[in-house]
Image (cartoon, coloured by chain):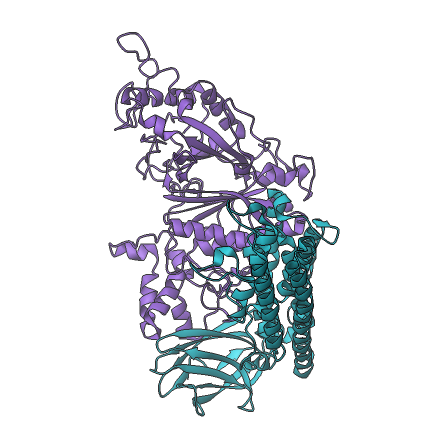
Amino acid sequence: MQGGDSRERKSGPFPGAEGAETPLSREDGEERKDRADAGANASGTASVVGAAAEGPRGTSRRGISRRGLFGLAGAGVAGLGIGIAADRGVQAVAAAGAPAAGSTVYPFYQEHQAGIVTPAQDRLHFAAFDLAPGATRADLISLLQDWTAAAAALTAGRDIGSYGAVGGPYDAPPEDTGEAFGLPPAGLTITVGFGPTLFETSAGLDRFGLASARPDALVDLPHFPGDQLEAARGGGDLCIQACADDPQVAVHAIRNLSRIAFGRAAIRWSQLGFGRTSSTSTSQATPRNLFGFKDGTANVKAEQPAVVDEHVWVGAGDGPAWLTGGSYLVARRIRMTIETWDRTALREQETVFGRTKGEGAPLSGGTEFTEPDFASTGNTGAPLIAATSHVRLAHPAQNNGVQLLRRGYNFVDGNDDLGRLEAGLFFISYQRRPSQFTTVQLALARHDAMNEYVRHVGSALFAVPPGAARGSYLGAALFA
Amino acid sequence: MQPRLLPLAALAAATALALTGCVPNASAPGATHAALTVDSSATACTVSASTASAGNVTFTVSNSGDQVTEFYLLGDDQLHIVGEAENIGPGLSRTLVVDLNAGSYFTACKPGMTGAGIGQAPFTVTPSSAADAATNAPGDADLAARVETANANYASYVKDQIGQLVTGTAAFAAAYTAGDDDTARTLYAATRAHWERVETVAESFGDLDPKLDLREADLEEGQDWTGWHAIEKDLWPADAEAGFAAYPAAERARLAGLLVADTATLNEKVQPLSFTLAQQTNGAIGLLDEVATGKVTGEEEVWSHTDLWDFQANVDGARVLYAGVRDVLVQKDADLAATLDTRFAALQALLDAQRVGDGFVLYTDLSTGTVKGLADQVNALAEPLGRLTAALVL
């Protein structure tokens, strides 16, 4: 919910190599070639989980496309053509004027990990993991290699493993759990991060010989006034953020990645998010949080490469070289007492935010994207945007120009013992330095009028390594 | 739990076919894996190619006919079965994965599942470097002998455990009937261990399992509750609902008598059993499933809280099953064997840390962190154990 209005909002063509991925299609469409096709040619082979599975383009062993399999299974042998047609790349389909729902594919192997400046998808499944007691450095490396290979397959819309959900030996459990069978890639991104305890436990134990590689900034966030953190909802050696436009696709990713981890790492805590609360691209409309207000109006946007470079990506010389091109991920589980909020007058609600509820315009006037004028006063001489309003306290102008790339999600996890909805915001932000978050959050924790309606119950910080190169794996430079 | 390890009926095929024409598991990264299709119609058995490279070969068999069909991959004598996909209903498809050496084979379909089959055609497997490099396994005959030994040993183990269950149950029932609750409580978990070690076999007799091992939560409305857990509640009534009355002597005698009689029946039923390789490996998997769903959650022994005794017994049984086939596994997939060795040992170390005297800490005295550690290690073992059947039977 941190505001962080950006001072410039330029839109324009985005340089693809630098920031927001544009949905890739043709290239990956080629790789996601239909298995029915492979079968018909009697020459198809499927990729094996493992870093070596991705061969050079054109000669790569083809993985199993879920949609392709669906076509084959649904139509029988006679329907070979259906699966192929359904599995065409996005561009081809778009050219026909009828984009297939969920057919967006974001490339996995690239300079920065996807899922950061990628246009925020609608759904989230986030999981934090702890390495198993006794796990070794070799276990950690092999886990990251297996996750990388699996993530490349999953984000391309392929099943896990050589045989996938239904093509394997009849007397063995299927390699892929199968609930995404027949579903499109749905814009899935998988983003992996490293927590402080991976480098050194709270007891000072260097389990994996990584203590010397730990960035100075990768330490537990400080206690903020009002924090009511629950240990079971925070921390973790590793994290995976899975975002997709279909919740089943995101859950499928976490489920299979945690299955791959059994024996090496286990889930410590996890969180589902059902609605994005930020826009990370000018192509997206601003969504609303569970307070009913537009959130993320002034977010860092992928279309601002200079801002992204300055505020999101860890630069050369910032710290250990292995993290250059990466970012820091802050996760905060923020419980909202929405029952109380809902009994609050509209005047109070808008005063708390400093914006109108309908349009999302600053109370100083204009429309949603008008810059707030904090000096503007009303007839009593009081500022139109209150001193304790969220938009003012979170604004870069109040925080030495600090900006965050927010990527949070609404959650409702059933209800508590009192029958109140267990609802809130799963706040995620990406920043070049954790201190960016700390600066903004300190200002909010001290003064934000919204504190009456929110409670921070979970907290975690992760260093997110840069993207993996083809043939390598996420975080490889850390172990070099 | 649905029983996964069924008594041998007519399932010799899985073992026989498993050990012919195989090379060690070649599913490591870099291994090739040919995918072929087979169309089994009323009149033809059309395979999409008549050759493949040595290594794993996948046949996706589709039944386009109107009878239930089978697909066979036969050896060069056109008699012995290298692999088969059976019971494929009209309109369905099923995948057969076989790990093949270079050589001559035959493919055939059998719509209607009887008769000589149709469309028998030669199928040639050409050498490939990956498979050749791995061809250092002992002869098929040697493997077959080891499997035969494992089968016989496991049958003996089951009979021995049930035999000890009979003896232990008699002593337990006598103490319980006599009102010697302290002795009965002492014997309870230790005796049940014999049941839990072979649980997947014991519970495969559909009528005996509910008589002997039904938990109160499993009861249907009006169902007579007998067996171990009915007695358990009477011996450990502390957590029972308000108004629960201790069983009168006559009810004690009835329950004890039934327990002894049903256990004797079980003993008779296990005498003629023998087991296929797949039944053994799936039995090991099934025992770990029992741990994961019932024991590590504390749902099995809700009155006595002796879940860790059952946990240990399930793991004992799984380890015996694994040990029986381990030699064969080492030849076929040494990496998987090494992983299973390590993870069995790690789970045992966690259990050993909870030992008190001859037994264990009560489930209710375990911390959440300890239970999570056990559950994580059960997952760590069960996941690779799930690959055991395919690694051996493929």
Placement of B251 over or under B45, stated as above or below: above
At horizontal 36% and vertical 47% (from top left) the residue drawn is: A245
x and y, in percent, of residue A477 in the image:
60, 45
Is B263 placed left or right of A352 in the picture? right
Nearer to the camera, A261 or A479: A261
Check the image and name the residue furthest to the left.
A97
x and y, in percent, of residue B380 in the image:
60, 55
Check the image and name the residue furthest to the top.
A380
Image colour assigned to chain A: purple
At horizontal 53% and vertical 27% (from top left) the residue drawn is: A435
Placement of A401 over or under A54, stated as above or below: above
Image quadrant where one finds the N terminus of chain A:
top left
x and y, in percent, of residue A51 in the image:
56, 57
Report the label total.
0
Nearer to the camera, A189 or A197: A197
**Chain colored cyan:** B
Nearer to the camera, B222 or A63: B222
Placement of B93 over or under A329, stated as above or below: below
Hey, which quadrant is residue A95 in on the image?
bottom left
Nearer to the camera, B248 or A208: B248
Q: Is residue A98 visible?
A: yes
Hey, which quadrant is residue B332 in on the image?
bottom right
x and y, in percent, of residue B110 in the image:
43, 86
Q: Is residue B335 visible?
A: no
At horizontal 57% and vertical 63% (from top left) the residue drawn is: B255
Hey, which quadrant is residue B30 in on the image?
bottom right
Check the image and name the residue furthest to the right.
B357
